[in-house]
Image (cartoon, rainbow, N blue to C red):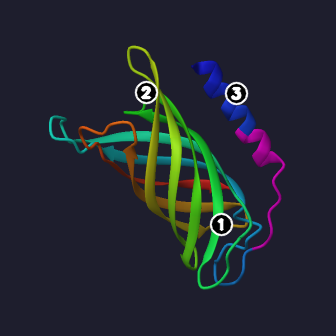
Amino acid sequence: MLKIIFALCLVVFNQSAYSNGSSLSSSYSLSEEDSLSRVRFFVGGVRSHQEDFKSELYPFLNFNYRTIGDYWLQEPVSVRWFMEGGVNFLAFFLPSAYAKLGPEIKLMNNFYLFSSLGLFFGYFFSPFIVPFGGTGFNYVYPISKSISLEMETGIHLPIIFVSELFLFPYITIGIAFN
């Protein structure tokens, strides 16, 4: 598992070293070129909502790489596709990985609504893979042409559990590098 995490970090840092940035507009909005691909480091909390499961807020770290395509719909709303892969450390030490993709809708300047489908890769006594779906909001606040502060909140739902409903709402804050 550590080899996978190390390899992912190398790919992420290699991509960020070759990314190009452009200047910010005077209104602190991201240009389309600036927001296409970024490395993100988050700290946050996740809660599990299920009848027989203790519902506590669990802290986690998240490192991910998010790439976004060009807008394929401009009117009446702006929509584009995103892909994201990352590593989570639940309670700051239990590692897991995920990959997800879906549409992202620009609601207003630097504020986005997204939905996604993905796969979660974890290890709890044995390895497992869980397909999931989710939705959330993302706010991007540019600090400079290559660094942004990001806040994200959303909810994930494993697709394989049909007899009981598992919901995983989360909230994060972190830094993104273009």
Q: Amino acid at mark 2?
A: Phe
Q: Amino acid at mark 1?
A: Arg
* Sequence-first tag of 2 and 3: 3
Left or right? Give the position of 61 relative to 23.
left
In the displayed structure, 127 sits above or below 108; it is above
Separation (CA) of disc 1 from disc 3? 28 Å
Residue 178 appears anywhere in the view = no
Residue 34 appears anywhere in the view = yes
Separation (CA) of disc 2 from disc 3? 18 Å
Disc ID at residue 108: none
Crowd band around label 2 with a 10 angstrom C-alpha radius: few (<14), some (14–19), many (20+): few
Q: Amino acid at mark 3?
A: Ala
Residue 80 position in % (x across, y down):
65, 66
> The residue tagged with tag 3: helix, strand or loop?
helix
Residue at the spot x=47%, y=38% of the render? 131
Crowd band around label 3 with a 10 angstrom C-alpha radius: few (<14), some (14–19), many (20+): few
Camera-side residue of 82 and 174: 82
> The residue tagged with tag 2: helix, strand or loop?
loop
Q: Quadrant where the C terminus lies?
A: bottom right
Residue at the spot x=73%, y=71% of the render? 32
In the displayed structure, 22 sits above or below 95; it is below
Disc ID at residue 80: 1
Question: Is residue 135 shown in magenta?
Answer: no
Circle 1/circle 3 CB separation < 8 Å: no
- The residue segment tinted magenta is 12-23
Crowd band around label 1 with a 10 angstrom C-alpha radius: few (<14), some (14–19), many (20+): some
Left or right? Give the position of 72 relative to 167.
right
Separation (CA) of disc 1 from disc 2? 34 Å
Q: Nearer the viewer, mark 1 or mark 3?
A: 1
- Outermost residue, top side: 125
Q: Quadrant where the N terminus lies?
A: top right
